[in-house]
Image (spheres, grey):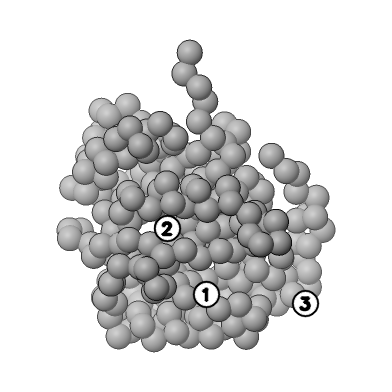
Amino acid sequence: METKKELLIIIPAYNEEKTIVNLLQQLEQPEIASIADILVMNDASSDFTNWVVKKRNHAVVTHVFNLGYGSGLQLGYKYAVRKKYRYVIQMDADGQHDVCNIPILYKALKTPDADGNFPDIVLGSRFMDGSTEFPVSTVKKIAIVWFRTLLKLGTGRDITDPTTGLQGLSWRTFLFYSRYNHFDDKYPDANMLMQMLVLGFHIREIPAVMHLRTTGVSMHSGLKPFLYMFRMTFSISSAWLREKLLKMDTKEVGNLKKF
C-alpha cells in the first residue's frame, strides 16, 4: 500500500505544453517523487497542456475560463486542504524554478529557527548570497526595490525577493489562503507578504536556483510591468490598512488550527 505523502507541489499553468513536460520529467525523479505529489492547475490553456499532464498520470484541474494566476493557486490550496496535505510548494511551469529547490524548501519548512518557530512561508529568493545570478529588466528592478521599501516601512522586515513565485507553505498558511477574500485572484506577490507579515505569520527566505524563461510569453511582458507596479502598490497599501489598522483577520488567524 502506497504511503500518503505530506507534500503537494502546485504548478499553475497557462499554455505551457512546451516547458511543462521537461519539468514533470524532473519532478518524477525518485528524489522528488518519493516525497511529493503533483497538482497542475491548468488555467483554460488553448494548447495541449491539459493532455500532456494527464498522459503522465498527474492530478490536473482545468478551468473552463481563464481565471488568473491567483485563482489557480487558491483552488490548489483548497485541494491541498481537502486532501489533508501538511505542506505545499508552489512553482512555475515555465522552467524558471529549478527542481533542485524542492528538497531544500521542504527541509526549511520542517526546520525551526533559533526561537523554536517553524516557518509558515519559505521564499525562494533570486537575490541572496548563494542564489544563482538572475538578470532582471530595469523596470522590474525598480518595482522590486519599491516593493522591498513598502514592506520595510510596513513591517520592518527586509525581504530580498518580494515577487518570487517559488514558495513553500505550511498547513495553516494555505488553509488561511484558501478562504474567501484572503488571497489575490490575479497577482499574489508582495501584497500577500505584507498581509501575512502584519498578521504575524513567520516568513523565511532562502537562496534559490532559477533560470530565465526560454520559451512562451511572461505574464509581465510588454506594458504589463507598469500596470502591475501601480496595481501592486495599491494592493500592498490596502493589505496594510486592512490588517494593521482595521485588524480584519486578526481573530480568524488566532483561531487557525494546527495540522
Screen quadrant of the C terminus? top right
Which type of secondary structure does the marked residue at label 2 adopt?
A: loop
Left or right of residue 72: residue 235: right
Label 1, label 2: how far apart the Cα atoms are = 14 Å
Which type of secondary structure does the marked residue at label 3 adopt?
A: helix
What type is the residue that disc 3 sits on?
Answer: Leu
Q: Where is residue 139 in the image (x, y as percent from the top left)?
A: 33, 84
What type is the residue that disc 2 sits on?
Answer: Leu
Left or right of residue 110: residue 138: left
Viewer-proximal residue, 49 or 114? 114
Which residue position holds label 1?
A: 159
Residue 184 appears in the figure: no
Position of residue 58 relative to residue 191, above or below, is above
Which type of secondary structure does the marked residue at label 1 adopt?
A: loop
Viewer-proximal residue, 93 or 200? 200
Which residue position holds label 3?
A: 245
Question: What's the residue at 63%, 54% (across, down)?
Answer: 112
